[in-house]
Amino acid sequence: MTVAELRALSAELESNLSPSAKKVLEKRYLKRTPDGEPLEAPVDMFARVAENIAEADHLYHPEKPLDQTVAEFFAVMARLEFLPNTPTLMNAGRELQQLSACFVLPVDDSMESIFGAIRDAALVHQSGGGTGFSFSRLRPKNDLVKSTMGVASGPVSFMRVFDMATETIKQGGTRRGANMGILRVDHPDIIEFIRAKEDEHILNNFNISVGVTEEFMGAVLTGGDYALRNPRSHEEVGRLNAREVFDLIVDLAWKNGEPGIVFLDRLNRDNPTPGLGEIESTNPCGEQPLLPYESCNLGSINLAIMLKDGAVDWERLRRVTRTAVHFLDNVIDMNRYPLAEIGEMTRSNRKIGLGVMGWADMLVELGVPYDSEEAIRLAHEVMGFVHEEAIQASEELARDRGVFPNWEKSTWKDRGRQVRNATLTTIAPTGTISIIAGCSSGVEPVFALAFIRNVMDNTELPEAHPVLERVLKERGLYSEGLMKGIAAVGGLHDMDVPEDLKEVFVTAHDVTPEWHIRMQAAFQDHVDNAVSKTVNFPNQAKPEDVERVYLLAYELGVKGVTIYRDGSRQDQVLNIGEVKRKGADGSDGAPLQMELGPQGAPIMPVRPSRSPVLRGETREKVTGCGSLYVTVNEDDYGPREVFANMGKAGGCASASTEAIGRLISLAFRYGVPPDKIVKQLKGIRCHVPLGFGPNQILSCPDAIGRALADKYHIGGGNGGPAVGQLEMPIAVAQGACPDCGGAIEHEGGCMVCRSCGYSKCA
């Protein structure tokens, strides 16, 4: 690539990057100084990654210059045609050099294996990776342990230990760890497992899925029983009605989105190396089935720009696919794996997972409704093309570099195809990389057609899907008022726009669950691994709606199902109790003035005017939303006011904590004692608490209650020390973006904000 070409490409990249993309790159991907200042621009990051990954070519042809490979890798990334997964963008060419997103670790039925897996998982999480586990080999609760003549505690109890270890690594300040926990449906403890996350404040570092067998699903359809088997002895130890178990799975998924379902027999039907063992688990998002100690090396093609003259640009798609396969194969060689066993297994099978993003954008550009037969047909055509081109690219690499070492033990040998990689395609959740690319995520529908972007001085600017904005302007329909209206509801369904636009510009919540599954199944037909796809339900959906989707998924041949019912993890009841007017120590406190109502009757006792000087101290509480600083100021009458600070102005978490502080201050002014406020605040939960046991922080309100409990020695305080007032860090809000207060998308077990680029998982 010439200097002129490089400059032109750099300028093109700069113009193509959205404000959200620039923000997420600056915050999460670019090299930074210790003070947080970027050391590189986006073009420098892509150059760094391209140069590093291209170096693998020298392992096979040390005499060959790398210029052409570097240029090809750089071009597909800088043009936003293809992006590798987040760890590769972050770490390639840097000290860590850990390039894989997720791993599967074995858990055998021994203390050595269990705690060895915890140790290994800690090392993986420390490197920024996620982990998948099957707990199906562990003996059930109350089973005999001959070595101690005691009884086993069961898989769920050990999952809590894994969860605690993950939490500890998170608190150490690294990229958050995430886990997948799978238990076979025929394990004797399956009911306890299904109910494991019924209480939403436990196992928060796990996604959980039931490993479903063909035997079980057959029994579901006939209403029959199925056998439970002790994994230690493989003997039948009981029977359950399959339909009742299935209904329980459905009910819990309807309530809070978990457990999901993984069809184990289908994973192993497509296992390319059955001679090496059965696939028992997946990565945390469920789209990458892996053998123990394997890793997933993922990347995605941006379909949104694979168009020319109103049709799919097949030649461009072919070129990008083949370059991407070359890139991902090189990643395997350049990766610095957190465990030697992972490195050995990954290099032996050389699995890659090339997927797509921007699918919904491609459909919109083509004028094809997402929920249409034409979209299903095109999904088969596009992904079938990508899959076959990926195989051919892998065959070319095999001719040059050799087949993957375990090829002789693989199903590829039986198929007569000599490939470099045991698997080639995966549809992963694309999260932040789709924000960088400026396209829709994975094969999901567009989540919202417009949103409000908060800029400096809290100015609100509507921002719409670029194709929708263009079409509305072409038809003379565009207005700022219309865009704000669309942003308020997310879609066009309630807008005064032509019906043909409503048909094409659909959102995730406009698409019925059945069409979500049909689209997932269409892509699954051409994917080696699995498809990450969230089936969105409205809040008013019924359990039977979830049931229909699960049965349809089984019928259509998908490998796993994840559902999310809007608002199901955020339902919260706050009960307001009576107010009594005693001091924190139980005394009557200082004399108070009385405020009179319209008829002269006393309403509440009220304190004298605020003194110009108050005594106060600040306590830090670390929550699942970040660090929260609670300041309590006192006068001669006792506590007077509370300030709770977190995050940037304009964020949802910041606004909520400020509001709670104001209301507490008002309550103090009218003589409400701290113990009554603590009683109301402690125990309120969000879906991402922090910590374990009595010191667990359930939510930001719970943290404020605990800070007051510490201050006034009210039962249950954890004695947190007072600290000086500090600069407030960015918080992670729940239910809304911490940076801008925008809507959070639930995608493949993660949360993403497209308004500003925030992602929980990156």
Image: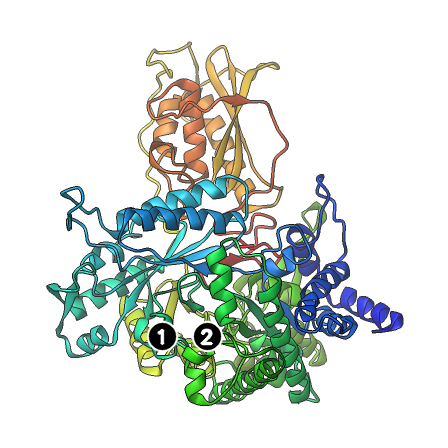
Q: Residue furthest right?
A: 4
Q: Is residue 385 visible?
A: yes
Identify which residue is drawn at 59% across, 74% down: 358
Looking at this view, is 227 or 571 the one in front? 227
Q: Quadrant of the N terminus?
A: bottom right
The residue type indicated by label 2 comes to Asn
Q: Report whether 464 appears left or right of 716.
A: right
| Residue annotated with mark 1 | 275
Q: CA distance from mark 2 to mark 1?
A: 9 Å
- Secondary structure under tag 2 reads loop
Is 466 situated left or right of 718 in this image? right
Q: Is residue 602 visible?
A: no
- For the C terminus, the image quarter is bottom right
Front residue of this view, candidates 668 and 547 = 547
Q: Given the current orientation, which residue lies at the most extreme front position?
A: 63
In terms of sequence position, does the residue under pointer 2 or pointer 1 come before the other?
1
Say few, some or many: other residues with alpha carbon within 10 Å of mark 2 (under 14 / 14 to 19 / 20 or more): many
- Residue 202: percent from left, percent from top: 34, 46
Please report contact status of discs 2 and 1: CB closer than 8 Å, yes or no: yes
| Residue in the image at 51% along x and 37% along y | 657
In percent of width and height, residue 103 lies at: 46, 60
Disc 1 crowd, CA 10 A, few/some/many (<14, 14-19, 20+) = few
Quarter occupied by residue 564: bottom left
**Residue at 36% in and 21% down:** 714
Residue 357: x percent and y percent?
A: 57, 73
Q: Which residue is mark 2?
A: 406
Residue 295: image location, x then y, percent: 48, 63
